[in-house]
Image (tube, helix red, strand yellow):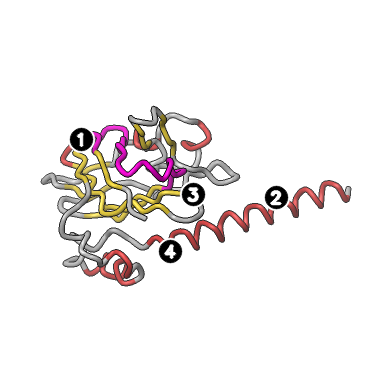
Amino acid sequence: MSIRITAKARRGMVALTAVAGLALGMAGCGGGDDDKPKPSSSTSKDSGSKPSAQEGQAETPLAELRGTDGLLLQITSAERDAGGFITVNGTVKNDGAESVVIPPQTSGDETEVIKHGPSLGGATLVDAKGKKRYYVLRDTDGRPLTTTGLGNLEAGQTLPVFMQFPAPPASTVEIDLQVPTFSSGTIKISG
């Protein structure tokens, strides 16, 4: 009986540590939602909580990936941190004239990721020179370390998004971002 209680407590501590690390990572990474969402009153709250993205990257995105039905993924930052991760920030915008559902394929096809709901869990970074592919990180419960709960976007609506990956070697400064149903794009890594 005490082994079972100890195992539950250990799992709880691991989950708590993962959530705390994710929260710190998101707070430290800032948001990339300052270029388009400013006119919208509902998204101005989000941009206020992520002040570090206001360093001029908002004007010119690192990459624009076109998706289906008028969806546009604009990447505003790709920052390497000391912990060995890369956090990619951006916005998904509905450039179309009608409401659009973000395709479920963006979650990828891994059962462990799909069971946690719609996300950008299918995204990958491809290092062509190093011949490696990096997948979105997952926590101990299999949840992708990326924006989750994706659904409908009304015409003109934007949604701030992030994705966290393991970092390639420090010598890699350009990498290709691939998200299912979107075109791929090359982004420069900072940090």
Q: Of label 1 and label 3, which has the lower sequence position?
A: 1
Find disc 1 in the rendering and name its residue. Answer: 68
Q: Please state the horizontal and vertical placement of residue 190, each as a whole percent of the image.
A: 33, 53
Furthest-front residue in this view: 171
Q: Which residues are magenta?
A: 164-185
Q: Amino acid at mark 4?
A: Gly
Question: Based on the displayed image, in which of its 4 quarters is residue 34 positioned?
Answer: bottom left
> Which residue is drawn at the image coordinates 46% and 36% (left, top)?
114
Q: Is residue 183 magenta?
A: yes
Indicate which label's residue lies in the foreground, 2 or 3. Answer: 3
Judging from the image, what secondary structure is the residue with disc 4 in?
Answer: helix
Asked whether, in this view, residue 105 is left or right of residue 139, the answer is: left
Judging from the image, what secondary structure is the residue with disc 3 in?
Answer: loop
Q: Is residue 62 magenta?
A: no
CB under 8 Å between callouts 2 and 3?
no
> Which residue is drawn at the image coordinates 62% and 57% (left, top)?
17
CB under 8 Å between callouts 1 and 3?
no
Q: Amino acid at mark 2?
A: Arg
